[in-house]
Amino acid sequence: MTAAYDELMDYDEVLEKFEPVMGMEVHVELATETKMFSASSAHFGAEPNSNVDPVSLGLPGALPVVNAKGVEWAIKIGLALNCEIAESSRFARKNYFYPDQPKNYQISQYDEPIAYNGYLDVVLEDGTEWRVEIERAHMEEDTGKLTHLGGADGRIHGATSSLVDCNRAGIPLIEIVTKPIIGAGKRAPEVAKAYVSALRDLVKALGVSDARMDQGSMRVDSNVSLNRIGETEFGTRTETKNINSLKSVEQAVRYEMMRQAAVIEAGGEIIQETRHYQEADGSTTSGRIKETAEDYRYFNDPDLPPVIAPREWVEEIRATLPELPWVRKARIQEEWKLSDAEMRDLVNAGALELIIATVEQGTTSGEARSWWVSYLAQKANEAGVELEALHITPAQVARVVALINEGKLTNKLARQAVDGVLADEGDVDEVIAKRGLEVVRDDGAIEAAVDEALAANPDIVEKYKAGNTKVVGAIVGQVMKATRGKADPGQVNQLIAKKLNS
Ligand code: ADP
Ligand code: MG
Protein backbone atom coordinates (compact mmCIF):
# COMPACT_ATOMS: atom_id res chain seq x y z
CA MET A 1 0.00 0.00 0.00
CA THR A 2 1.55 3.25 -1.08
CA ALA A 3 0.43 6.25 0.88
CA ALA A 4 -0.49 9.33 -1.08
CA TYR A 5 2.15 12.02 -1.12
CA ASP A 6 0.18 14.15 -3.52
CA GLU A 7 -0.41 17.81 -2.96
CA LEU A 8 -4.16 18.39 -3.12
CA MET A 9 -5.99 21.62 -3.77
CA ASP A 10 -9.00 22.36 -1.62
CA TYR A 11 -12.12 21.24 -3.52
CA ASP A 12 -13.84 24.62 -3.47
CA GLU A 13 -10.71 26.30 -4.76
CA VAL A 14 -10.50 23.76 -7.62
CA LEU A 15 -13.95 24.84 -8.71
CA GLU A 16 -13.11 28.53 -8.59
CA LYS A 17 -10.26 27.97 -11.03
CA PHE A 18 -11.01 24.89 -13.11
CA GLU A 19 -13.69 23.09 -15.03
CA PRO A 20 -13.60 19.27 -14.85
CA VAL A 21 -14.18 17.06 -17.89
CA MET A 22 -14.93 13.37 -17.37
CA GLY A 23 -15.36 10.27 -19.41
CA MET A 24 -16.47 6.93 -18.04
CA GLU A 25 -15.47 3.58 -19.52
CA VAL A 26 -17.49 0.76 -18.03
CA HIS A 27 -16.89 -2.92 -18.75
CA VAL A 28 -19.81 -5.24 -18.15
CA GLU A 29 -19.28 -8.98 -18.14
CA LEU A 30 -22.21 -10.74 -19.78
CA ALA A 31 -23.78 -13.64 -17.92
CA THR A 32 -23.98 -15.88 -20.98
CA GLU A 33 -23.68 -19.65 -20.64
CA THR A 34 -20.63 -19.83 -22.86
CA LYS A 35 -17.74 -17.63 -23.90
CA MET A 36 -17.87 -14.99 -26.63
CA PHE A 37 -15.97 -17.01 -29.22
CA SER A 38 -16.00 -20.60 -27.97
CA ALA A 39 -18.18 -23.16 -26.19
CA SER A 40 -16.38 -23.18 -22.82
CA SER A 41 -18.52 -22.35 -19.83
CA ALA A 42 -18.53 -18.68 -18.88
CA HIS A 43 -19.55 -19.41 -15.27
CA PHE A 44 -17.61 -17.92 -12.39
CA GLY A 45 -15.85 -19.91 -9.70
CA ALA A 46 -14.67 -23.12 -11.45
CA GLU A 47 -11.30 -24.82 -10.81
CA PRO A 48 -8.54 -22.70 -12.40
CA ASN A 49 -8.03 -23.46 -16.10
CA SER A 50 -10.96 -25.87 -16.30
CA ASN A 51 -13.17 -23.61 -18.46
CA VAL A 52 -10.72 -23.44 -21.33
CA ASP A 53 -10.44 -24.63 -24.92
CA PRO A 54 -8.13 -24.05 -27.91
CA VAL A 55 -9.79 -20.70 -28.74
CA SER A 56 -9.62 -19.16 -25.28
CA LEU A 57 -6.07 -20.47 -24.87
CA GLY A 58 -5.08 -19.02 -28.20
CA LEU A 59 -3.70 -22.29 -29.56
CA PRO A 60 -2.42 -22.14 -33.15
CA GLY A 61 -5.08 -22.79 -35.74
CA ALA A 62 -8.04 -22.44 -33.37
CA LEU A 63 -10.88 -20.47 -34.90
CA PRO A 64 -13.34 -18.26 -33.00
CA VAL A 65 -17.10 -18.54 -33.53
CA VAL A 66 -19.32 -15.64 -32.44
CA ASN A 67 -21.74 -16.26 -29.58
CA ALA A 68 -25.13 -15.12 -30.91
CA LYS A 69 -26.45 -14.54 -27.39
CA GLY A 70 -23.55 -12.19 -26.74
CA VAL A 71 -24.45 -10.16 -29.82
CA GLU A 72 -28.13 -10.16 -28.89
CA TRP A 73 -27.35 -8.89 -25.40
CA ALA A 74 -24.98 -6.24 -26.74
CA ILE A 75 -27.84 -4.99 -28.92
CA LYS A 76 -30.16 -5.11 -25.92
CA ILE A 77 -27.79 -2.89 -23.93
CA GLY A 78 -27.36 -0.58 -26.92
CA LEU A 79 -31.12 -0.19 -27.33
CA ALA A 80 -31.67 0.46 -23.63
CA LEU A 81 -28.99 3.16 -23.87
CA ASN A 82 -30.86 4.80 -26.77
CA CYS A 83 -28.04 3.96 -29.17
CA GLU A 84 -28.10 3.43 -32.88
CA ILE A 85 -27.41 -0.19 -33.69
CA ALA A 86 -25.00 -0.81 -36.54
CA GLU A 87 -26.45 -2.95 -39.30
CA SER A 88 -22.96 -4.25 -39.84
CA SER A 89 -20.12 -4.05 -37.33
CA ARG A 90 -16.70 -5.65 -37.09
CA PHE A 91 -14.39 -7.31 -34.65
CA ALA A 92 -10.84 -6.03 -34.53
CA ARG A 93 -7.64 -7.24 -32.92
CA LYS A 94 -6.21 -5.05 -30.23
CA ASN A 95 -2.61 -6.16 -30.07
CA TYR A 96 -0.67 -6.15 -26.85
CA PHE A 97 1.25 -8.62 -24.79
CA TYR A 98 0.11 -9.59 -21.34
CA PRO A 99 0.59 -12.99 -19.67
CA ASP A 100 -3.14 -13.41 -19.01
CA GLN A 101 -3.90 -13.11 -22.69
CA PRO A 102 -2.37 -16.04 -24.54
CA LYS A 103 -3.28 -14.90 -28.05
CA ASN A 104 -1.29 -11.66 -27.67
CA TYR A 105 -4.32 -9.74 -28.85
CA GLN A 106 -7.75 -9.10 -27.50
CA ILE A 107 -10.72 -9.40 -29.82
CA SER A 108 -12.55 -6.12 -29.53
CA GLN A 109 -14.35 -3.66 -31.75
CA TYR A 110 -12.65 -0.51 -32.92
CA ASP A 111 -13.98 1.79 -35.62
CA GLU A 112 -17.18 -0.19 -36.17
CA PRO A 113 -18.82 -0.76 -32.79
CA ILE A 114 -22.18 -2.48 -32.63
CA ALA A 115 -23.89 0.40 -30.79
CA TYR A 116 -23.13 4.12 -30.81
CA ASN A 117 -24.55 7.60 -30.19
CA GLY A 118 -26.85 7.04 -27.26
CA TYR A 119 -27.60 8.58 -23.92
CA LEU A 120 -28.63 7.70 -20.39
CA ASP A 121 -30.60 10.11 -18.24
CA VAL A 122 -29.57 9.80 -14.64
CA VAL A 123 -31.11 11.29 -11.53
CA LEU A 124 -28.90 13.12 -9.05
CA GLU A 125 -29.42 13.08 -5.31
CA ASP A 126 -31.56 16.21 -5.27
CA GLY A 127 -33.76 14.88 -8.05
CA THR A 128 -32.29 16.79 -11.00
CA GLU A 129 -31.87 14.84 -14.21
CA TRP A 130 -28.53 14.75 -15.99
CA ARG A 131 -28.10 13.42 -19.50
CA VAL A 132 -24.93 11.42 -20.03
CA GLU A 133 -24.17 10.96 -23.71
CA ILE A 134 -22.91 7.59 -24.83
CA GLU A 135 -20.21 7.44 -27.45
CA ARG A 136 -20.32 3.70 -28.06
CA ALA A 137 -21.01 0.29 -26.60
CA HIS A 138 -18.85 -2.38 -28.15
CA MET A 139 -18.27 -6.09 -27.80
CA GLU A 140 -15.02 -7.62 -26.68
CA GLU A 141 -13.65 -10.53 -24.70
CA ASP A 142 -12.28 -10.62 -21.18
CA THR A 143 -8.70 -11.58 -20.37
CA GLY A 144 -7.55 -14.30 -17.98
CA LYS A 145 -6.59 -13.59 -14.42
CA LEU A 146 -3.20 -13.41 -12.74
CA THR A 147 -2.56 -14.28 -9.12
CA HIS A 148 0.71 -12.94 -7.78
CA LEU A 149 2.45 -14.86 -5.02
CA GLY A 150 5.04 -13.80 -2.52
CA GLY A 151 4.29 -10.07 -2.45
CA ALA A 152 2.09 -8.05 -0.14
CA ASP A 153 -1.70 -8.53 -0.54
CA GLY A 154 -1.55 -10.31 -3.87
CA ARG A 155 0.04 -7.41 -5.72
CA ILE A 156 2.59 -7.82 -8.44
CA HIS A 157 4.94 -5.53 -6.58
CA GLY A 158 7.34 -7.70 -4.61
CA ALA A 159 5.86 -10.95 -5.94
CA THR A 160 8.15 -13.91 -6.59
CA SER A 161 5.88 -15.83 -8.96
CA SER A 162 2.53 -15.49 -10.70
CA LEU A 163 -0.19 -17.97 -11.67
CA VAL A 164 -2.34 -17.65 -14.77
CA ASP A 165 -5.98 -18.74 -14.80
CA CYS A 166 -7.61 -18.62 -18.25
CA ASN A 167 -11.15 -19.36 -17.11
CA ARG A 168 -12.08 -15.73 -17.58
CA ALA A 169 -10.33 -15.42 -20.95
CA GLY A 170 -12.99 -15.06 -23.62
CA ILE A 171 -15.95 -14.21 -21.39
CA PRO A 172 -18.07 -11.67 -23.26
CA LEU A 173 -17.60 -8.06 -22.25
CA ILE A 174 -19.46 -4.98 -23.32
CA GLU A 175 -17.49 -1.78 -22.98
CA ILE A 176 -19.65 1.29 -22.68
CA VAL A 177 -17.86 4.59 -23.28
CA THR A 178 -19.36 8.00 -22.63
CA LYS A 179 -18.74 11.15 -24.60
CA PRO A 180 -16.88 13.76 -22.57
CA ILE A 181 -19.08 14.86 -19.69
CA ILE A 182 -18.73 18.62 -19.44
CA GLY A 183 -20.34 21.33 -17.36
CA ALA A 184 -20.92 19.24 -14.26
CA GLY A 185 -18.58 21.46 -12.21
CA LYS A 186 -18.95 20.80 -8.53
CA ARG A 187 -21.24 17.88 -9.22
CA ALA A 188 -18.82 15.96 -11.41
CA PRO A 189 -18.12 13.26 -8.79
CA GLU A 190 -21.83 12.92 -8.11
CA VAL A 191 -22.68 12.67 -11.81
CA ALA A 192 -20.05 9.95 -12.23
CA LYS A 193 -21.50 7.94 -9.38
CA ALA A 194 -25.10 8.43 -10.48
CA TYR A 195 -24.19 7.33 -14.01
CA VAL A 196 -22.47 4.13 -12.91
CA SER A 197 -25.30 3.38 -10.51
CA ALA A 198 -27.94 3.87 -13.23
CA LEU A 199 -25.96 1.76 -15.67
CA ARG A 200 -25.63 -1.01 -13.12
CA ASP A 201 -29.37 -0.99 -12.42
CA LEU A 202 -30.00 -1.03 -16.15
CA VAL A 203 -27.90 -4.07 -17.06
CA LYS A 204 -29.25 -5.94 -14.06
CA ALA A 205 -32.81 -5.17 -15.11
CA LEU A 206 -31.99 -6.35 -18.64
CA GLY A 207 -30.88 -9.64 -17.12
CA VAL A 208 -27.61 -9.62 -19.07
CA SER A 209 -25.13 -9.27 -16.20
CA ASP A 210 -25.05 -9.46 -12.44
CA ALA A 211 -22.97 -6.26 -12.59
CA ARG A 212 -21.13 -6.81 -9.31
CA MET A 213 -18.45 -4.18 -8.94
CA ASP A 214 -16.98 -6.00 -5.95
CA GLN A 215 -16.57 -9.21 -7.99
CA GLY A 216 -15.37 -7.58 -11.18
CA SER A 217 -18.37 -8.33 -13.36
CA MET A 218 -18.71 -4.57 -13.71
CA ARG A 219 -15.50 -2.53 -13.92
CA VAL A 220 -15.21 1.20 -14.10
CA ASP A 221 -12.41 3.39 -15.41
CA SER A 222 -12.88 7.09 -14.84
CA ASN A 223 -11.16 9.64 -17.04
CA VAL A 224 -10.72 13.11 -15.61
CA SER A 225 -9.08 16.27 -16.88
CA LEU A 226 -9.22 19.90 -15.89
CA ASN A 227 -9.12 23.07 -17.90
CA ARG A 228 -8.95 26.59 -16.56
CA ILE A 229 -12.33 28.26 -16.46
CA GLY A 230 -12.87 30.10 -19.72
CA GLU A 231 -10.57 27.86 -21.73
CA THR A 232 -12.34 25.66 -24.24
CA GLU A 233 -9.63 23.14 -25.00
CA PHE A 234 -9.71 20.02 -22.82
CA GLY A 235 -6.80 19.37 -20.52
CA THR A 236 -4.79 16.15 -20.46
CA ARG A 237 -6.74 13.29 -18.88
CA THR A 238 -5.79 10.53 -16.54
CA GLU A 239 -7.67 7.25 -16.46
CA THR A 240 -8.22 5.75 -13.01
CA LYS A 241 -8.73 1.99 -12.86
CA ASN A 242 -9.39 -0.46 -10.09
CA ILE A 243 -12.50 1.30 -8.79
CA ASN A 244 -14.76 -1.27 -7.17
CA SER A 245 -17.65 0.48 -5.51
CA LEU A 246 -19.99 3.35 -6.28
CA LYS A 247 -18.56 5.35 -3.42
CA SER A 248 -15.09 4.90 -4.88
CA VAL A 249 -16.22 6.19 -8.28
CA GLU A 250 -17.20 9.43 -6.62
CA GLN A 251 -14.03 9.64 -4.57
CA ALA A 252 -11.73 8.79 -7.49
CA VAL A 253 -13.09 11.68 -9.55
CA ARG A 254 -12.92 14.06 -6.62
CA TYR A 255 -9.38 13.04 -5.77
CA GLU A 256 -8.16 13.46 -9.34
CA MET A 257 -9.71 16.92 -9.53
CA MET A 258 -7.92 18.01 -6.36
CA ARG A 259 -4.62 16.38 -7.35
CA GLN A 260 -4.54 17.65 -10.92
CA ALA A 261 -5.46 21.17 -9.85
CA ALA A 262 -2.54 21.25 -7.44
CA VAL A 263 -0.13 19.99 -10.11
CA ILE A 264 -1.29 22.53 -12.70
CA GLU A 265 -1.33 25.38 -10.19
CA ALA A 266 2.26 24.60 -9.23
CA GLY A 267 3.28 24.89 -12.89
CA GLY A 268 3.49 21.14 -13.42
CA GLU A 269 2.06 19.09 -16.23
CA ILE A 270 -0.52 16.29 -16.14
CA ILE A 271 0.78 13.17 -17.81
CA GLN A 272 -1.67 11.03 -19.77
CA GLU A 273 -1.44 7.88 -17.72
CA THR A 274 -3.53 5.21 -16.08
CA ARG A 275 -3.80 5.51 -12.32
CA HIS A 276 -4.85 3.04 -9.67
CA TYR A 277 -7.50 3.80 -7.12
CA GLN A 278 -6.39 3.00 -3.59
CA GLU A 279 -9.32 1.77 -1.56
CA ALA A 280 -7.52 2.28 1.73
CA ASP A 281 -7.15 6.04 1.60
CA GLY A 282 -9.22 7.10 -1.41
CA SER A 283 -6.19 8.30 -3.36
CA THR A 284 -4.97 7.44 -6.85
CA THR A 285 -1.44 6.38 -7.66
CA SER A 286 0.46 6.44 -10.91
CA GLY A 287 0.14 3.38 -13.18
CA ARG A 288 1.52 3.15 -16.67
CA ILE A 289 1.88 5.72 -19.40
CA LYS A 290 -1.24 5.49 -21.47
CA GLU A 291 -0.96 3.83 -24.84
CA THR A 292 -2.55 5.59 -27.74
CA ALA A 293 -4.78 3.76 -30.17
CA GLU A 294 -1.88 3.55 -32.63
CA ASP A 295 0.13 1.50 -30.16
CA TYR A 296 -2.39 -1.31 -30.40
CA ARG A 297 -2.12 -1.68 -34.17
CA TYR A 298 -5.80 -2.40 -34.47
CA PHE A 299 -6.91 -4.26 -37.56
CA ASN A 300 -10.05 -6.17 -38.51
CA ASP A 301 -9.91 -9.72 -37.27
CA PRO A 302 -9.55 -11.88 -40.40
CA ASP A 303 -10.97 -14.90 -38.53
CA LEU A 304 -14.32 -13.25 -37.94
CA PRO A 305 -16.91 -12.10 -40.47
CA PRO A 306 -18.78 -8.81 -39.97
CA VAL A 307 -21.62 -8.96 -37.44
CA ILE A 308 -24.84 -8.40 -39.31
CA ALA A 309 -27.82 -7.14 -37.36
CA PRO A 310 -30.88 -7.09 -39.65
CA ARG A 311 -33.43 -4.45 -38.67
CA GLU A 312 -36.14 -7.06 -38.01
CA TRP A 313 -33.88 -8.78 -35.51
CA VAL A 314 -33.13 -5.48 -33.77
CA GLU A 315 -36.86 -4.78 -33.53
CA GLU A 316 -37.49 -8.25 -32.15
CA ILE A 317 -34.88 -7.60 -29.49
CA ARG A 318 -36.38 -4.20 -28.73
CA ALA A 319 -39.69 -5.92 -28.10
CA THR A 320 -38.06 -8.11 -25.42
CA LEU A 321 -36.77 -5.15 -23.39
CA PRO A 322 -38.20 -5.39 -19.88
CA GLU A 323 -39.68 -2.47 -18.02
CA LEU A 324 -36.64 -0.22 -17.63
CA PRO A 325 -35.54 0.80 -14.12
CA TRP A 326 -36.62 4.45 -14.37
CA VAL A 327 -40.06 3.48 -15.72
CA ARG A 328 -40.45 0.90 -12.97
CA LYS A 329 -39.36 3.43 -10.37
CA ALA A 330 -41.99 5.91 -11.53
CA ARG A 331 -44.66 3.21 -11.47
CA ILE A 332 -43.76 2.09 -7.97
CA GLN A 333 -43.67 5.64 -6.66
CA GLU A 334 -47.18 6.07 -7.99
CA GLU A 335 -48.40 2.76 -6.55
CA TRP A 336 -46.94 3.43 -3.13
CA LYS A 337 -48.10 7.03 -3.21
CA LEU A 338 -44.72 8.47 -2.27
CA SER A 339 -43.58 12.03 -2.76
CA ASP A 340 -40.48 12.69 -4.87
CA ALA A 341 -38.50 13.34 -1.71
CA GLU A 342 -39.65 10.11 -0.04
CA MET A 343 -38.81 8.12 -3.14
CA ARG A 344 -35.39 9.77 -3.39
CA ASP A 345 -34.65 8.90 0.23
CA LEU A 346 -35.41 5.24 -0.43
CA VAL A 347 -33.23 5.19 -3.51
CA ASN A 348 -30.36 7.04 -1.86
CA ALA A 349 -30.53 4.69 1.11
CA GLY A 350 -30.21 1.74 -1.30
CA ALA A 351 -33.52 0.47 0.06
CA LEU A 352 -35.76 0.42 -2.99
CA GLU A 353 -35.01 -3.08 -4.25
CA LEU A 354 -35.07 -4.49 -0.72
CA ILE A 355 -38.45 -2.96 -0.04
CA ILE A 356 -39.84 -4.20 -3.33
CA ALA A 357 -38.60 -7.70 -2.51
CA THR A 358 -40.12 -7.49 0.98
CA VAL A 359 -43.49 -6.41 -0.42
CA GLU A 360 -43.30 -9.37 -2.81
CA GLN A 361 -43.08 -11.55 0.30
CA GLY A 362 -46.43 -10.26 1.48
CA THR A 363 -45.97 -7.07 3.50
CA THR A 364 -47.48 -3.69 2.71
CA SER A 365 -45.11 -1.08 1.30
CA GLY A 366 -45.48 0.92 4.51
CA GLU A 367 -44.46 -2.02 6.70
CA ALA A 368 -41.48 -2.85 4.51
CA ARG A 369 -40.41 0.78 4.31
CA SER A 370 -40.56 1.33 8.03
CA TRP A 371 -38.21 -1.60 8.68
CA TRP A 372 -35.69 -0.89 5.95
CA VAL A 373 -35.38 2.86 6.28
CA SER A 374 -35.46 3.11 10.04
CA TYR A 375 -34.32 0.20 12.20
CA LEU A 376 -32.32 -1.66 9.56
CA ALA A 377 -30.84 1.52 8.07
CA GLN A 378 -29.70 2.41 11.58
CA LYS A 379 -28.13 -1.04 12.01
CA ALA A 380 -26.35 -0.76 8.65
CA ASN A 381 -25.11 2.65 9.61
CA GLU A 382 -23.78 1.39 12.94
CA ALA A 383 -21.99 -1.47 11.18
CA GLY A 384 -20.67 0.86 8.47
CA VAL A 385 -22.05 -1.32 5.66
CA GLU A 386 -24.54 -0.86 2.85
CA LEU A 387 -28.12 -1.83 3.63
CA GLU A 388 -28.00 -4.78 1.22
CA ALA A 389 -24.93 -6.17 2.97
CA LEU A 390 -26.86 -6.72 6.21
CA HIS A 391 -27.32 -10.39 7.07
CA ILE A 392 -31.07 -10.35 6.70
CA THR A 393 -33.22 -11.11 3.68
CA PRO A 394 -36.46 -9.47 2.57
CA ALA A 395 -38.21 -12.80 3.30
CA GLN A 396 -36.98 -12.66 6.91
CA VAL A 397 -38.18 -9.09 7.31
CA ALA A 398 -41.56 -10.13 5.90
CA ARG A 399 -41.72 -13.00 8.40
CA VAL A 400 -41.15 -10.59 11.29
CA VAL A 401 -43.89 -8.31 10.00
CA ALA A 402 -46.28 -11.26 9.70
CA LEU A 403 -45.56 -12.31 13.29
CA ILE A 404 -46.25 -8.78 14.52
CA ASN A 405 -49.53 -8.77 12.63
CA GLU A 406 -50.47 -12.11 14.14
CA GLY A 407 -49.83 -10.67 17.58
CA LYS A 408 -46.98 -13.09 18.20
CA LEU A 409 -44.33 -10.41 18.43
CA THR A 410 -44.48 -6.94 19.89
CA ASN A 411 -42.43 -4.26 18.13
CA LYS A 412 -39.82 -4.57 20.79
CA LEU A 413 -39.58 -8.34 20.52
CA ALA A 414 -39.53 -8.01 16.76
CA ARG A 415 -36.46 -5.79 16.94
CA GLN A 416 -34.78 -8.39 19.14
CA ALA A 417 -35.66 -11.10 16.64
CA VAL A 418 -34.15 -8.98 13.88
CA ASP A 419 -31.02 -8.42 15.99
CA GLY A 420 -30.66 -12.18 16.28
CA VAL A 421 -31.00 -12.70 12.53
CA LEU A 422 -28.45 -9.96 11.87
CA ALA A 423 -26.09 -11.69 14.29
CA ASP A 424 -26.40 -14.93 12.29
CA GLU A 425 -28.22 -16.76 15.06
CA GLY A 426 -30.55 -18.37 12.53
CA ASP A 427 -33.73 -17.45 10.71
CA VAL A 428 -36.53 -15.55 12.41
CA ASP A 429 -38.30 -18.54 13.94
CA GLU A 430 -35.06 -20.07 15.15
CA VAL A 431 -34.05 -16.83 16.83
CA ILE A 432 -37.45 -16.53 18.48
CA ALA A 433 -37.18 -20.07 19.80
CA LYS A 434 -33.57 -19.70 20.95
CA ARG A 435 -34.04 -16.33 22.58
CA GLY A 436 -37.53 -17.17 23.88
CA LEU A 437 -39.04 -14.08 22.30
CA GLU A 438 -42.63 -15.01 21.63
CA VAL A 439 -45.35 -12.88 23.19
CA VAL A 440 -46.84 -14.57 26.26
CA ARG A 441 -50.33 -15.57 25.19
CA ASP A 442 -51.11 -17.36 28.37
CA ASP A 443 -53.86 -15.23 29.98
CA GLY A 444 -53.34 -16.94 33.31
CA ALA A 445 -49.69 -15.92 33.56
CA ILE A 446 -50.41 -12.36 32.54
CA GLU A 447 -53.36 -12.13 34.87
CA ALA A 448 -51.23 -13.36 37.75
CA ALA A 449 -48.61 -10.71 36.95
CA VAL A 450 -51.32 -8.04 36.82
CA ASP A 451 -52.79 -9.14 40.17
CA GLU A 452 -49.36 -9.11 41.72
CA ALA A 453 -48.56 -5.63 40.42
CA LEU A 454 -51.91 -4.27 41.62
CA ALA A 455 -51.50 -5.84 45.06
CA ALA A 456 -48.00 -4.40 45.38
CA ASN A 457 -49.13 -0.87 44.54
CA PRO A 458 -52.25 0.07 46.51
CA ASP A 459 -51.34 3.76 46.26
CA ILE A 460 -51.46 3.66 42.47
CA VAL A 461 -54.75 1.82 42.52
CA GLU A 462 -56.14 4.50 44.80
CA LYS A 463 -55.01 7.33 42.55
CA TYR A 464 -56.54 5.55 39.58
CA LYS A 465 -59.86 5.14 41.31
CA ALA A 466 -59.74 8.82 42.24
CA GLY A 467 -59.74 9.61 38.53
CA ASN A 468 -56.04 9.79 37.64
CA THR A 469 -56.10 7.04 35.02
CA LYS A 470 -52.64 7.91 33.66
CA VAL A 471 -50.97 6.17 36.61
CA VAL A 472 -51.90 2.86 35.04
CA GLY A 473 -48.71 3.12 32.95
CA ALA A 474 -46.62 2.24 35.99
CA ILE A 475 -48.59 -0.99 36.46
CA VAL A 476 -48.22 -1.88 32.79
CA GLY A 477 -44.50 -1.29 33.15
CA GLN A 478 -44.27 -3.68 36.08
CA VAL A 479 -46.23 -6.37 34.28
CA MET A 480 -43.99 -6.05 31.23
CA LYS A 481 -40.99 -6.33 33.48
CA ALA A 482 -42.39 -9.35 35.28
CA THR A 483 -43.05 -11.07 31.93
CA ARG A 484 -39.66 -9.96 30.61
CA GLY A 485 -41.22 -7.86 27.89
CA LYS A 486 -43.07 -10.75 26.37
CA ALA A 487 -46.62 -9.72 27.23
CA ASP A 488 -48.65 -7.84 24.67
CA PRO A 489 -48.97 -4.32 26.14
CA GLY A 490 -52.44 -3.89 24.62
CA GLN A 491 -53.67 -7.03 26.30
CA VAL A 492 -52.12 -5.98 29.63
CA ASN A 493 -53.80 -2.58 29.44
CA GLN A 494 -57.16 -4.16 28.82
CA LEU A 495 -56.80 -6.56 31.72
CA ILE A 496 -55.81 -3.83 34.15
CA ALA A 497 -58.68 -1.61 33.10
CA LYS A 498 -61.10 -4.51 33.46
CA LYS A 499 -59.91 -5.27 36.98
CA LEU A 500 -59.82 -1.66 38.17
CA ASN A 501 -63.20 -0.79 36.75
CA SER A 502 -65.00 -3.80 38.10
P1 ADP B 1 -9.07 4.87 -24.11
O1 ADP B 1 -9.51 3.47 -24.34
O2 ADP B 1 -7.81 5.25 -24.76
O3 ADP B 1 -9.11 5.24 -22.68
P2 ADP B 1 -11.67 5.72 -24.95
O4 ADP B 1 -12.06 6.57 -26.11
O5 ADP B 1 -12.13 4.32 -24.90
O6 ADP B 1 -10.10 5.83 -24.85
O7 ADP B 1 -12.17 6.40 -23.63
C1 ADP B 1 -11.79 7.69 -23.25
C2 ADP B 1 -12.85 8.28 -22.35
O8 ADP B 1 -12.39 9.54 -21.85
C3 ADP B 1 -14.13 8.59 -23.06
O9 ADP B 1 -15.19 8.44 -22.16
C4 ADP B 1 -13.98 10.04 -23.45
O10 ADP B 1 -15.20 10.70 -23.56
C5 ADP B 1 -13.21 10.58 -22.29
N1 ADP B 1 -12.31 11.70 -22.59
C6 ADP B 1 -11.71 11.99 -23.76
N2 ADP B 1 -10.94 13.08 -23.63
C7 ADP B 1 -11.04 13.49 -22.34
C8 ADP B 1 -10.47 14.55 -21.58
N3 ADP B 1 -9.61 15.40 -22.09
N4 ADP B 1 -10.81 14.63 -20.27
C9 ADP B 1 -11.65 13.76 -19.73
N5 ADP B 1 -12.21 12.75 -20.39
C10 ADP B 1 -11.92 12.60 -21.69
MG1 MG C 1 -11.09 2.36 -23.69
Image (tube, helix red, strand yellow):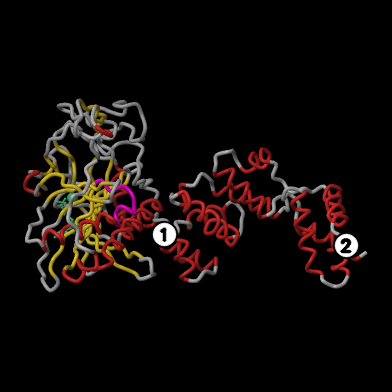
Q: Quadrant of the C terminus?
A: bottom right
Depth check: 218 or 412 in front?
A: 412
- Give the extent of the magenta segment: 242-250
Left or right: residue 490 compared with residue 227: right
The secondary element bearing badge 2 is classed as helix
Q: Is residue 69 visible?
A: no
Q: Which quadrant of the structure image shows residue 299?
A: top left
Disc 2 residue type (three-letter): Lys
Give the number of marks: 2
The secondary element bearing badge 1 is classed as helix
Tell me whether the residue at label 1 lies in contact with that at label 2, contact meaning CB atoms closer than 8 angstroms: no
Residue 398 placement (x, y as % from top left): 60, 51
Residue 192 vertical position relative to residue 438 in the rendered view, above or below: below
Q: Earlier in the sequence, mark 1 or mark 2?
A: 1
Q: Is residue 93 visible?
A: yes
Depth check: 265 or 155 in front?
A: 265
Left or right: residue 393 compared with residue 184: right
Mark 1 lies on residue: 325
Q: Residue at x 35, y 71 (%)?
A: 128
Alpha-carbon neighbours of circle 1 within 10 Å: few (<14), some, or many (≥20)? some
Residue 491 placement (x, y as % from top left): 79, 57
Residue 49 vertical position relative to residue 364 in the rendered view, above or below: above
Q: Residue at x 64, y 53 (%)?
A: 401
